[in-house]
Image: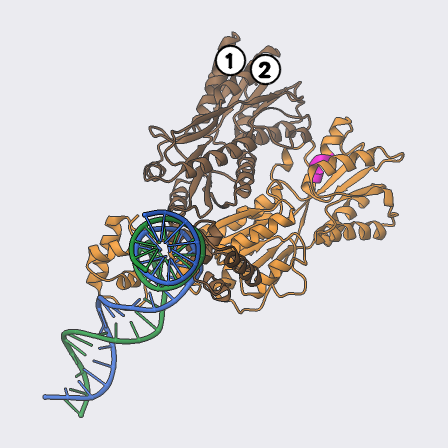
Chain colours: A orange, B brown, C green, D blue
Amino acid sequence: MASMDDVAKRAGVSIATVSRVLNNNGKVNEATRARILKAIKELKYQPSRVAKRLRSKSVSSNLLGVLIPDIQNPFYVEVLEGIEEVAYNNNYALIMCNFGQDEKKEKLYLEILQSEAIDGLIAAPASEEDVQLKKMVKDGLPVVCVDRGLSGIDVDVVLIDNETGAYNAVDFLAKSGYKRIAHITGLLSIPSSVLREKGYRNALIDNGLPVIDELIKNGDSKLPSGIKLCEELLALPEPPDAIFTGNNLITLGALEVIHKKNLRIPDDVAILGFDDMFWASSLNPPLTAVRQPAREIGRRAGELLIQRINEPDRSSIQMILNTELMKRSSA
Amino acid sequence: MASMDDVAKRAGVSIATVSRVLNNNGKVNEATRARILKAIKELKYQPSRVAKRLRSKSVSSNLLGVLIPDIQNPFYVEVLEGIEEVAYNNNYALIMCNFGQDEKKEKLYLEILQSEAIDGLIAAPASEEDVQLKKMVKDGLPVVCVDRGLSGIDVDVVLIDNETGAYNAVDFLAKSGYKRIAHITGLLSIPSSVLREKGYRNALIDNGLPVIDELIKNGDSKLPSGIKLCEELLALPEPPDAIFTGNNLITLGALEVIHKKNLRIPDDVAILGFDDMFWASSLNPPLTAVRQPAREIGRRAGELLIQRINEPDRSSIQMILNTELMKRSSA
DNA sequence: TTTTTGAGTGAAAACGTTTACATTAGCTGC
DNA sequence: GCAGCTAATGTAAACGTTTTCACTCAAAAA
């Protein structure tokens, strides 16, 4: 690969001048500039992003980190799409880290990202207390959190209103006449799971329905727990007439059980999932779901991050997007 | 961030010695080694992967590129998971590029990857003729192709036997008594789509069924085309009694249409999809599908790539994995 | 005793950029 | 005719590593 040196030689100038035309700063004679551009084209010269990154932290070297808990989860895939969209438009590359809810793995990835000298990071940390990530923020790395924040520290966050989303969903179920509405939660160490459960409880109470402990099952945000807990619910002496699932993977697990038992949706049991999926209409019956604007979350996060990179000292922003109840036929 | 210099100063040695203990090469006195390790720990020193990468192409700097056509597609997500798994286990980071079937975007990403001085690349190129990628291979970049090869050039490839997979699927449909078996193809510029169609045709012929042109629709591997083309099929004066869909996104589109029309699967129309999905059992009825071992494809590709990085001159390997027909209830 | 060996270490170049600083030369204004 | 300015360019240091080469010193060999 041709380097700046090669270009400089061919154009008969020094590398400093080449750098100047590449970055469009400093004065350079029109004729020289033309000669340099010609040489660049002829040599198919491409600047090394690595050298650039090594040399100066001050100038952006266009590499962002993305740290997500579970790439199996379609929600994060959609967030990733949004991020990738704005990264691409701003000439940033993405280094992708999927820690699969494993804190040790998360830690290693954070170290790698730091060591790669990324310009900024979009993360959905395993916990709000994440000391390592907090430290990186304090050390000045531009960070935007997504789906979950970072407690006690000023950082940009893009969230959705989980509690209201859940509330509206369960309220809708209650108003539709369901009386025994169950809930399978996500991993309760994640704030969003807690908030969704809170919304669930409040909606029950506000609709004069009892909160029944045996109808609340604590899952871990993964598909198998959806299967297991839904089975438990349906095996109850008095099974629920509707299930509100805490995330999309749980929903899929629950659906599998319901179909296997040959129960009719929504007649035997209704189901309403938190998290929409782009193929929710392909389910039978089409799934009623709380839609998070996942792609927009990603886009917003990307935009916030690039802003912060360019203006490190602006005050931090908490952006809360709204959910939408997609009423289809499963509830 | 602490640098080697800081460590060297604290341990009272030169950076050369620090480098030696870090990379475990060259002789170094046990006492000195201990002092250096202590300093490293105390300073929480982490080597800069950037500097490492800049310095020497010879030593691996542990960064791989991944270039995929469509991260929306669950198949690629699963492949990505497999790659990520082996990358993580080998201390490689992943820089992820999703070109969304857009050749211009692909080109830009390839440039970026090159400029990032990656150690190797796993790619599912837009076309088998991809000149830019071919050039990179020729220039010595370790590359493993996935899902599609690169014509006229020696390169490691991990593929599945598309033709046999499709053949077996359609053969199964035929043997089950379906007479008017339709096919919605994927993008025909992708070899796998062509091979699947070929398998479809041969299975029809071998089962004494006519190949009917109006039952073959050319899609573009995306969900909307699944919707549109399935609608066309079902609107035919003599609609098909079974549909073999060319990929998972098309399957989802077709399902949406079938459900909307309130047709029963498989009684009114059977459906068999190429590409399994991890939630195929959550569909109603559970989807019969040709399963590609996507995760394994990713894993194998990752392993091949790391092998090639370590041994650039070994002869190239073409690995063909088998598909499996997952018989569920939709056909 | 002198030479050879090898273990242990350091100095310095190199990777490809950016950038602070120096240099040159032509002009302006007096 | 000279100080001072500006446009245009070059020199060299710096970023944080790896790696070659050279050096020192003590022990082994002669």
Amino acid, disc 2: Leu
> Which secondary structure is most common in the magenta stretch?
helix
Which residue corresponds to mark 1?
B203
Q: Is residue B107 visible?
A: yes
Q: Which residue is drawn at 67% across and 30% down?
A: B283
Secondary structure, mark 2, is helix
Q: How far apart are marks 1 and 2 (CA)?
A: 9 Å
Secondary structure, mark 1, is helix
**Whether residue B307 is situated above or below residue B168 in the rendered picture:** below
Q: In this view, does B194 lie to the left or right of A271?
A: left
Residue A28 x/y as whole percent: 25, 66
Q: Over which residues does the magenta segment extend?
A: A250-254
Amino acid, disc 1: Ala
Q: Name the quadrant of the C terminus of chain A.
A: top right
The crowding category of the residue bearing disc 1, from other C-alpha atoms within 10 Å (few below 14, some 14 to 19, many at least 20), is many
| Displayed quadrant of residue A51 | bottom left
| Displayed quadrant of residue A274 | top right
| Displayed quadrant of residue B231 | top right
Q: Can residue A157 be seen in this view?
A: no
Residue A286 x/y as whole percent: 68, 35
Which residue corresponds to mark 2?
B173
Q: In this view, does D7 lie to the left or right of A302?
A: left
Q: Do the residues labelled 1 and 2 touch (CB within 8 Å)?
A: yes
- Residue B187's tag is none
**Whether residue A86 is situated above or below residue B298 in the rendered picture:** below
Q: In this view, does B155 lie to the left or right of B43?
A: left
